[in-house]
Image: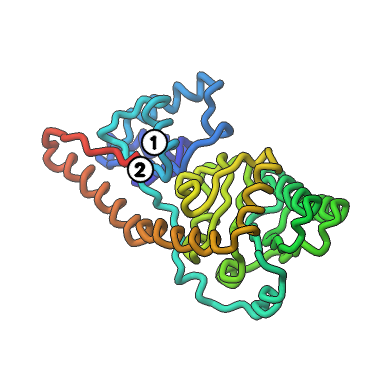
Amino acid sequence: MFVSGFNLWSLYGLCLKPFIRSRIVLLWDGVSPAVAYLQAPIRLTIRRIMARFFDGCISNSREGVEYLRTVLRVPDSKLRRHPYEVPSVELFHRQNTRVDTLDSWVSPRFLYVGQLIERKGINNLLLACSLLKKEGVGRFSTIIVGDGTQRVALRDLASKLGLSDQIHWAGQVNYEELGSYYRACDVFVFPTQEDIWGMVPLEAMVFGKAVLCSKFAGSHEMISHGKNGFVFDPNDPQELAHYMARFMRDPQLMERFGEASKQLISSYTPELAASVLAATVARVLQQRISSPPHVPEEVSA
């Protein structure tokens, strides 16, 4: 069985384990303050008990592996770090009829894709754009793709900041049509204030784009700071504006970082993720069949 967290269904599986002779592997997306429960001793105790009976644990992120190791006390022999939530570029092959409109927007083009909710930190992205305009760096576009409860408030904020010429609201876009936006942009921005992983930076990397990623996104581990993008504090609009300005003052930086993104993400494909899952299944089933002396595998963390 593959389970995706410390939930009731996982508990059911663990309880049935001795009766149906199953093996259970935890797929742990990652960790953030909201899901770590470091100040909740009862929940942590329950998690530690459950963790003892998993036969293997795979996490997208190093932080996720570290949480399992140090907080939940999972032994290294059961841990593996490998991003399994990775994009498939084939899903983006469908062309969007709005490509011409996208190409007409001023370059460089910064792109955000995701929900329009408070946790995603879009208000600080707008503040960073405002700072750029005040500094006289006004030749750029920021494209916001998505919808959510903050849609009206964010549009009002953009209007108050005088960003009507810089901000373009694309609204909700079908997933298979997002490729047009990734192709048209120059730099992807992910200003989230908390995400245990976050697929959109990886999707942008598949299209060979430079990435500005919040340090509070689990997927920031996929960004090599100063090589294919920059990792920033989303609560500091000045820092974000600084990195945006660097791309604007040195357009060749976007091209170099974009090529580095494509190379970095090439090592993390759905096919490779599937092979890691298959290898984990083979290992835990081998334990079940013959129970050989266990040799701890190296933890990729």
Left or right, 2 with respect to 115, comes to left
Mark 1 lies on residue: 65
Q: Residues within 10 Å of mark 2 (few under 14, many from 20)?
A: many
Which of 227 and 27 lies nearest the eye of the viewer?
227
Amino acid marked by disc 2: Arg
- CA distance separating discs 2 and 1: 6 Å
Tell me: 241 left or right of 44.
right
Give percent across and percent down for residue 77: 25, 34
Q: From the top left corner, tell me how far across and down residue 255 is, in percent.
A: 52, 64
Identify which residue is drawn at 44% across, 36% down.
63
Residue 33 location (% of width, % of height)? 56, 31
Q: Residue shown at 72%/54% (left/top)? A: 148
- Quarter where residue 237 is shown: top right
Mark toward the start of the polypeptide (2 vs 1): 1
Give the image location of residue 108, x and y in percent: 65, 64
Q: What residue occupies the far top of the structure in this picture?
A: 41
* Quadrant location, the C terminus: top left
Q: Quadrant of residue 163?
A: bottom right
Mark 2 in CB contact with mark 1 (< 8 angstroms): yes
Where disc 2 sits, the SS reads strand
**Element type at mark 1:** helix
Identify which amino acid the numbered label 1 is placed on: Val
Question: Residue placed at 57% from the left, 66% from the top?
Answer: 182
Report which residue position mark 2 lands on: 81
Q: Residues within 10 Å of mark 1 (few under 14, many from 20)?
A: many
